Image (spheres, helix red, strand yellow):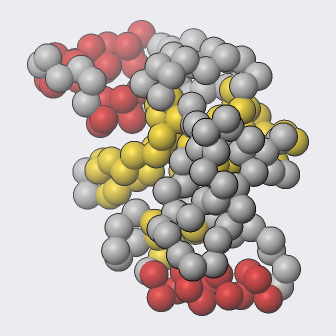
């Protein structure tokens, strides 16, 4: 996808406005909208489906935004029970803060297919764009074409453990 002259000009004006802070999350997020990464979902060796890079991705680049419906924790708890009752094996609930959770189970994008790894090649970061908080997945290191995108889910420690299937040499054994 070619970037138009107007878009490049707009990006230069943003760079000038930000001064030396060219690594700001807002600028990176803006660039992600103009230049999406080529990703695909497919069968994963970790768990069911996964998300894979279809192009080389450099270190510390925005890979994809995790999108879905923003809901309150009480609604997330109810949905989790409902999803289990109707046989949805995986729910895609991502906590932003104490008041907001993104539910990508039924209305998310490809980011919901990113699997957990104890040795991930990406990390999730919450950024603020204007007044809205967004979840963005960044690369921790260079990612090769065809490599599966992973991040550490950082689930809270609970008594009932969820077995980790990442297969990493330093696997912790559980997600929580």
| Residue 172 left/right relative to 45 | left
Q: Looking at the rendering, in which quadrant would you find the N terminus?
A: top right
Q: Is residue 116 visible?
A: yes
| Residue 89 left/right relative to 63 | right
Q: Is residue 113 above or below residue 75?
A: above
Residue in the picture at 24% in, 20% down: 22
In this rendered view, identify the residue nearer to me: 165 or 151.
165
Instruction: Measuring from the top left, give residue 25's x and y in whole percent.
Output: 30, 35
| Residue 94 left/right relative to 52 | left
Write down the quadrant of residue 173 in the picture: bottom right
Instruction: Measuring from the top left, give residue 142's x and y in whole percent.
Output: 55, 17
Q: Is residue 33 visible?
A: no
Q: Is residue 74 above or below residue 98?
A: below
The tally of labels here is 0
Write down the quadrant of residue 162 in the picture: bottom right
Residue in the picture at 68% in, 48% down: 115
Residue in the picture at 32% in, 19% down: 11
| Residue 158 left/right relative to 128 | right
Instruction: Measuring from the top left, give residue 29's x and y in whole percent.
Output: 39, 35
Q: Looking at the rendering, in which quadrant would you find the C terminus?
A: bottom right
Q: Is residue 27 above or below residue 5?
A: below
In this rendered view, identify the residue nearer to me: 2 or 41.
41
Residue in the picture at 71% in, 62% down: 163
In this rendered view, identify the residue nearer to me: 176 or 62.
176
């Amino acid at each position: 996808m070619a970037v138009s002259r107007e878009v490049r000009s707009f990006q230069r004006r943003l760079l000038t406005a930000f001064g030396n802070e060219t690594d700001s999350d807002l600028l990176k997020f803006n660039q992600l909208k103009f230049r999406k990464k080529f990703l695909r979902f497919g069968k994963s060796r970790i768990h069911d489906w996964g998300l894979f890079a279809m192009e080389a991705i450099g270190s510390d680049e925005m890979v994809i935004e995790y999108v879905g419906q923003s809901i309150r924790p009480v609604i997330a708890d109810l949905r989790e029970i409902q999803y289990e009752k109707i046989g949805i094996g995986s729910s895609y609930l991502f906590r932003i803060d104490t008041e907001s959770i993104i539910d990508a189970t039924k209305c998310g994008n490809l980011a919901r297919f990113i699997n957990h790894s104890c040795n991930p090649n990406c990390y999730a970061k919450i950024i603020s764009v204007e007044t809205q908080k967004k979840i963005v997945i960044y690369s921790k290191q260079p990612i090769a074409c065809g490599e599966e995108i992973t991040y550490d889910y950082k689930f809270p420690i609970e008594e009932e453990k969820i077995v980790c299937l990442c297969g990493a040499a330093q696997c912790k054994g559980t997600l929580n």
